[in-house]
Image (cartoon, rainbow, N blue to C red):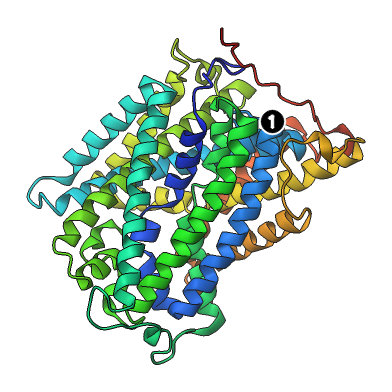
Amino acid sequence: MESDHGVKRSLKTRHVSMIALGGSIGTGLFVASGSAISTAGPGGALLAYAGIGLMVFFLMTSLGEMATYLPVTGSFATYARRFVDPAMGFAMGWNYWFNWAITLAVDISTVGLVFKFWFPHVPSWTFSLGALVIIFLINALSVNSFGETEYWMALIKVVTVLIFLAVGFLTIFGIMSGHATLLENFVYKKAPFVGGIPSILSVFVVAGFSFQGTELIGITAGESEDPEKSIPKAIKQVFWRIILFYILAIFVIAALIPYTSPNLLGSDAADVAISPFTLVFRRAGLAGAAGVMNAVILTSVMSAANSGMYASTRMLFSLGVTGDAPKIFSRVNGRGIPMPALIGTAAIGLLTFATSIFGDRIYTFLVSASGLSGFIAWVGIALSHYRFRRAFKAQGHELSELRYHAKWFPFGPLLALVLCILVIIGQDLHSFASFDWQAILFSYMSIPLFLVLFIYYKVRHKTHLIPLEEVDLTPHKVKVEKKD
């Protein structure tokens, strides 16, 4: 079963669902959720995560409508190229590839930090290097090996969250701890809302980063066995699971740990001993909670790195196919793996990781430069869908022709667009208040990088916004093998 350019359509519906789910359940939930409660209080954190969850729902349905109509590996970069402006597709593709290639390096660095918990005297870079080799081999084997690995790693995270919720609610009602806290921490001191609107806005940014990775569902469309069925099904499942997991997990943490607790301030994998999940398990009397959570966080980080390798490889492959990257990157081997793109991505990940050992400043610069790239991709998805639906109507098509309909058009993509821009602007408002230009440059570096790519392509190829009547709406027919 092959896609148009040689990649194989072997991802099953369960793979697609778990890839998107695994992409969004990670250290953002297991560790950083505590700092969100500390910043905005229990009510503020719940409001911010619910708001971002709503935005992600609309983005997912927008992406789902386009991905079932045009299930290609290039996903939103291809949609921007066809429905908005080729320059935007070029900039979005390179921006997204860069984002995940750098994120891959961040994740393998984090693997080393996580192993420090068990092996404090072994150099952490040895574990990071080992992780990179394992992830490379998983992705080099077949798309099915990637999907299967991601499925089981995501399942570990899902089971952990379910156990956490069960233990948490039993503790809240005093069944496991002897003292029923109920909702007393929701009215403790300044709770439920702390710090007003500015604090809620800053948590919007934290929540936004936590949900990064849900758009991977679009990248998988080009290698999904039956995208017209698997994409809509995965979108429905993933959205409700994410909302339930995040909202309920934050509710449990906020009910059991007061927002004033200094233990909520941890924000990365190095803080596993004070992860809100670890604290709740300990409070319920479960010994060894830190060790177990460290293993789960290790799985999370490996899963994120695995997804990052896959996403950036496929985007570089797609750029090669469209001619926006050297043609060598459009080649695939007999197993349907774009090996030149995989090797190129792994090399950038390795080089970036090397800078974290030999030159902290360059590493910090690269990580900052990729910071807002995921949100820029989300802006592109909302814009592309708005243009796609308008072009569809302008060219005389009926909505009944679409296999999957996005909800509440045009309200959905427009709301997602506004919220995405708000999150981008709110990335580092403190630096503007104190006129810290160096911090502003580091926080917002992704934006000028995207604009440079966009303007370069626009000037060189003299592209323009495609008129609605000229938008290419040629549907993408999936070639499916006939079984005997």
Residue at horizontal 42 percent and vertical 19 percent from the top: 339
Residue 438 vertical placement versus 297 (above, below): below
Residue 357 at what x, y percent from top left?
A: 23, 45
In the current view of this chain or complex, which residue is farthest to the bottom?
189
On-image quarter of the N terminus: top right
In the current view of this chain or complex, which residue is farthest to the front?
175
Residue 222 at what x, y percent from top left?
A: 58, 27
Residue at horizontal 59 percent and vertical 18 percent from the top: 3
Residue 88 at what x, y percent from top left?
A: 68, 40
In-image side of 141 versus 247 (left or right): left
Q: Is residue 90 visible?
A: no
Q: Nearer the viewer, residue 300 or 362?
A: 300
Residue at horizontal 49 percent and vertical 63 percent from the top: 207
Which amino acid lies under the numbered mark 1 shown in the image of this protein?
Answer: Leu
In-image side of 272 versus 406 (left or right): left
Residue 458 vertical placement versus 109 (above, below): above
On-image quarter of the C terminus: top right
Circle 1 is placed at which residue position?
70
Q: How many marks?
A: 1
